[in-house]
Structure formats: structure tokens, C-alpha cells
Amino acid sequence: MEKTNAVARVILNRPPLNVVDIQTLRALRDAFDSLRNDKSKVIVLSAEGKAFSAGVDIKDHTEDKVGTMMTLLREVFEMLWAFEQPTVAIVQGAAFGGGLELAIGCDFIIASESAQFGQPEIRVGVFPSIACLLLPRLIPWAKALELVLMGESISAQEAYRLGLVNRVVAAAQLETEAKAFVNKLAELSGPVLKLAKRAALVGLGQEWSVDRMQSYAKLERLYLDEMMKLEDTHEGLKAFMEKRKPQWKER
């Protein structure tokens, strides 16, 4: 984590593709928790390396780990959504699965022109819980459903056209352009920024983080109580780890 002037920055750093495992989720939760009462005007989420994040670690979807993983995921987003300050994701390369969910969990996304966005979870027998909650609110329903149900990715330019990202910039200029965007926010009144964000959430029908977390609780139960009991879910996860095509049992 870095703090400069009015900006706090949380940085993903798990080479080579910033795959998010249980340990990384704990680190994210703790980083966000440490900023709970921070005086920074803007919170930034970025990543080292060639990818923002390739998603949540499939190995943490086993029976003995998935409950812990889902609890930590909920805690991470509960803290992210509770920030009164505007939050900005800076995305380069792949933002897949949980990586895309972290990005769209922020208020703004600044993307490299080479960035790719996608929710491939359906191909391994699971659904993306956070994306199912957020994507239908951010982009047209048909496109949100396509991303969730087909597992295909879209380019940064397509994400911009859909309104999913705020800026698409040349890869070499990503850091410079993102800093310029963040600094424009940081030059404004912190208390006014917080109130304006709060007012916009009321307009969206999501007063603070409460409404989103109540909706997410339903998705979490659907994930753990129903989906994780499907034979096809276990077959999909096993096939991915064995690097083969899943043989769906339709149950």
C-alpha cells in the first residue's frame, strides 16, 4: 500500500497474473480495513505486472476452502463499498473473474487499451457472484447476461462503449493518465466528494453499502447452498485443474 498526499493506493502483487487466493483476499481485507478512517480523498486499486488480475484461485473452491473464500470475498467488498471516498481501479492486461469483480467494485475504471475484461467462471461450473450483482446495474442486461452465461471476454474499447470503464488509454500512458484522473478528484473538497458519492448512490437506489450487501447475501447462499452441491460444479473445477474439457453430468 502507498499513500501520497490525498491519495491512498492498494496494490495487488502476486506474480505472474495476480491470481487472488485466500491469503491475497486476507491481505486486501486488511489493507481496506486499515483505510477505514483514513483522511485520503481518493482510494486507488492497482496491480503490478502485466495483468490486473486473472481471477480467484480455483484451488480455493474445494469443499474445505470455499466457505472461507466466500466469507473473505464478502468482507473485501463490504469494506470496498463502505468507502465514502471515490474509488478508482487502474487496469492493465487481464481483468478476469474475481479480477473484473474487483475492478467493477470500484467507482471508476481507467484501463489500458490492451486490457481484457471477462467472467469465465461459467466454463468451470460456477457463477461470478459479485458480477451477477453488479454487471446488470452497470451495462445493458443482455450484455451482462452474455458475459456471465457465455464466459467470453471483451476488449477495453468494448468495455468503454458499454460504459463499464471511464477511460481507455495507451498502455505506455496508463500510469500518467490514471494519476491525472485521480489528481482531478483529489483537488476537490473531500467532504463534498463524499456527500456527492452518497447522493449518487441514493439516486441509484443503493444507499451506502447496505443494499448491495443485503443483495449479495442472497447470492452467497445460492453459491454455497445450491451451486456447490451440483455434480457439474465439482466436475468443472476438477476438469480445470486436470487441464481437460469437463464432462457435464447435467446435475
Image (cartoon, grey):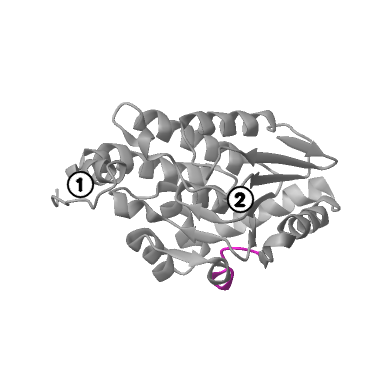
Q: Quadrant of the N terminus?
A: top right
Asked which quadrant contains residue 83, the reply is: top right
From this viewpoint, is residue 157 visible? yes
Q: Residue at x 50, y 50 (%)?
A: 101
- Which of the two residues, 158 or 194, is positioned nearer the viewer here? 158
Q: Amino acid at mark 1?
A: Asp
- Which of the two residues, 238 or 22, is positioned nearer the viewer here? 238
Q: Residue at x 48, y 55 (%)?
A: 134
Task: Name the mark on residue 37.
Answer: none
Q: Amino acid at mark 2?
A: Cys
Examine the structure image and report whether residue 163 is included in the region drawn in magenta. Answer: yes
Count numbered badges in the picture.
Answer: 2
Specify which label sits upstream in the sequence, 2 or 1.
2
- Which of the two residues, 62 or 131, is positioned nearer the viewer here? 62
Q: Position of residue 154 (x, y in %)?
A: 48, 66
| Span highlighted in magenta in the image | 160-166
Q: Position of residue 13 (x, y in %)?
A: 60, 38
Q: Residue furthest top?
A: 64
Query: For mark 1, what is the residue?
Result: 232
Q: Position of residue 188 (x, y in %)?
A: 84, 53
